[in-house]
Every structure is written in structure tokens, then in C-alpha cells.
Amino acid sequence: NGGGKVNKGASTADHNSGMNVAATYDYCDAGGNLVYQVVRLRPKSFRQRRPDGNGGWTWNLGGVERVLYNLRAVLAGDPEETVYYVEGENDVEALRAHGRIATTHAGGANAFKPEGVDVLRGRKLVVIADNDDPGIKMALQVCQALRPIAASVKLIRFLGDVIPGADVSDFLSDPAMT
């Protein structure tokens, strides 16, 4: 599955936490082992957790080596194929549904760190910014971190009369935007 397994609506409550879980996004290492999850909650918010080794969860990423989402698909993909870097797991899944290799980091627009991006060395990359200030700032940070190691880096921004905050998922799902 590329190591970026997503479970949407699989359960409406996390029985150990009492939280209303909308989706979980698995961040796996190169061998396919679960390292941590991003959990999308209802109402919309996000938390991160890691396996505690006893069948439960620790609700932080303290001491965990960060990996990119959908890492195994990135590593398994044709090295000549473009990799899309987006803000958020839902956008990765939207691009995957359209046959594209895509990745992101945990934590959203304000959490980018260059940890783990070396796996993109020599790749052709397209960074797609969400249509808001944090999304544009994140996309520029990603471009700056990847430019020295990538074969090429291109940045895509939404222009014109596009809804503030729109992202690639919105673009792919709304015929009026295409």
C-alpha cells in the first residue's frame, strides 16, 4: 500500500482515548513498519501518536525519527517519475487516487522540518502550496530544503479567484476549479 495506509471512518471513536476519530494516517518506515500515526478528529483537528509497545498509544512523537508519509511508495516509484509534495495526508491520498506519487510530513504547514527528506535526493519534485499564507510559507520552506538535493523542484500555487485555504484535494474534486 505504499506505507501510507489511511483508515477513514473505520471507527467513530478511539476506545482508549474517547476521541471521535475521522481518519488515521500511518507513517511507516522503509520496511513498512508503523512508526507513528496522524489522527484526524471530529470536529476537525489533528493529533499524533506512536505505538507504545504494549498494544496502545503514546500521544506524542517524542524521540521518534520522522519519516515522510507514503514513504514506501516514494522509494518504490520510478526514480524518473515526479514526486508531489503537498500539505497534508488527505492531499497525498487525492493524488495517489489519480496515479501520482505524493508525500507530506506530519503536523501541517507550520511543522515542516527537513528531517527525512534525504530520501528525495535526485528526484524531480513538484511542491503544491495550499492557498493560504501558512501553506505558501511551508511550500517555500520545502522548496528551499529540497533544491540542493533534488534533480528539480517546481512550485505550484493557485492563482486567481480561488477559495482561500483551497488545496490540491479541493482542486481535484471540484470541476469548477479544473
Image: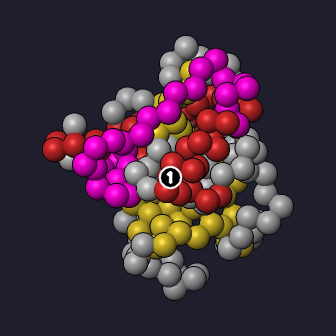
- 138 or 77: which is nearer to us? 138
Count of picture labels: 1
Q: Residue at x 59, y 42 (%)?
A: 140
Image quarter of the C terminus: top left
Q: Residue at x 36, y 42 (%)?
A: 158
Q: Magenta region's main secondary structure?
A: loop
Give the SS element for disc 1. helix
Q: Residue at x 62, y 66 (%)?
A: 48
Q: Is residue 104 above or below residue 77?
A: below
Which amino acid type corresponds to the residue marked 1 in the rendered image?
Gly
Quadrant in the rendering for residue 59: bottom right
Q: Residue at x 48, y 67 (%)?
A: 40
> Badge 1 local density, few (<14 within 10 Å), some, or many (20+)?
many
Quadrant in the rendering for residue 63: bottom right
Which stretch did the figure color magenta? 145-170
Residue 164 place in picture, x, y as percent: 34, 58
Residue 108 place in picture, x, y as percent: 56, 58
Chosen colour scheme: secondary structure
Q: Which residue is mark 1?
A: 135
In the image, farthest residue toward the front: 160
Magenta residue check for 157: yes
- 57 or 103: which is nearer to us? 103
Residue 7 place in picture, x, y as percent: 44, 58
Magenta residue check for 28: no
Residue 117 lies left or right of residue 16; in this view the side is right
Asked whether the viewer can see residue 87, the reply is no
Residue 42 lies left or right of residue 74; in this view the side is left
Asked whether the viewer can see residue 80, the reply is yes
In the image, farthest residue toward the bottom: 18
Residue 56 place in picture, x, y as percent: 67, 72
Q: Is residue 166 above or below residue 160?
A: below
